[in-house]
Amino acid sequence: MIKEKELKGLGGWLILVGIELFFYFIFIGYVIFSRLNVINFIDVWIQLLDPYSEMQTIHLGLFILCDIGLNCLFLLLNAYIIFLYFTKSYKFPNFFIIFSSSFIVFKLIQRCWYFFIVLPFEFKFEFSLIKDIVIAIIYTCIWIAYMLKSVRVKNTFVNDRRSDDTYSSTVS
């Protein structure tokens, strides 16, 4: 049987966590760049600002700006978490939990805002909307439980943490 002290390093299930972080980074980057497509982005803004356009609405403009801005923040946070992952910083599990939870909340708020405020009369209830959110919540809960309970996580992410001996000797 493997001893607890041998469970250390970016192995085991932590490899899947690292792969997931890279996929999130690629996915968020793709979402940002697809929304910033120069031709479509300029056309949308021209129609949003034209008072005679059917698309002219403040809610859609705010939705686009907030969506791009928050996706940029998630991209930066994801890059920082990838850095923490490879440096094996003790901050990684907490930041991973915050990132995973807030990403779910952001996607839920984004869908609600879009369907109920931007397009309130065109909303059609689809089971796939709820199914996707429920699957994402279950998936996130599994990884959060892993981050909180795993021996490998506790043994791997210890860098940059002050030990009690170092702290007491510095204070004295």
Image: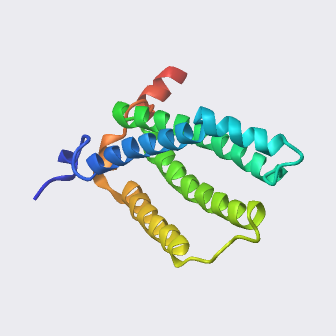
Q: Is residue 150 left or right of residue 62?
A: left
Instruction: Please name whichever residue, 22 or 114, is drawn nearer the observer in this view of the structure.
Output: 114
Image height check: is 25 above or below 135? above
| Residue 53 in view of the camera | yes
Residue at the (50%, 73%) spot, across then down: 128
Q: Quadrant of residue 2?
A: bottom left
Residue 162 placed where, x, y %?
45, 31
Q: Is residue 3 left or right of residue 24?
A: left
The number of callouts visible is 0
Q: What is the basis of the colouring in this image?
A: rainbow
Image height check: is 78 above or below 147? above
Residue 33 placed where, x, y %?
53, 36
Instruction: Please name whichever residue, 53 or 117, is drawn nearer the observer in this view of the structure.
Output: 53
Q: Is residue 62 left or right of residue 146?
A: right
Find the residue positioned furthest to the right. Answer: 51
Residue 9 placed where, x, y %?
24, 40
Residue at the (54%, 50%) spot, across then down: 98
Find the residue positioned furthest to the front. Answer: 52
Residue 155 placed where, x, y %?
30, 44
Instruction: Please name whichever residue, 135 or 102, is drawn nearer the observer in this view of the structure.
Output: 135
| Residue 172 in view of the camera | no
Image height check: is 114 above or below 127? above
Residue at the (40%, 44%) spot, across then down: 21
Instruction: Please name whichever residue, 114 or 95, is drawn nearer the observer in this view of the structure.
Output: 114
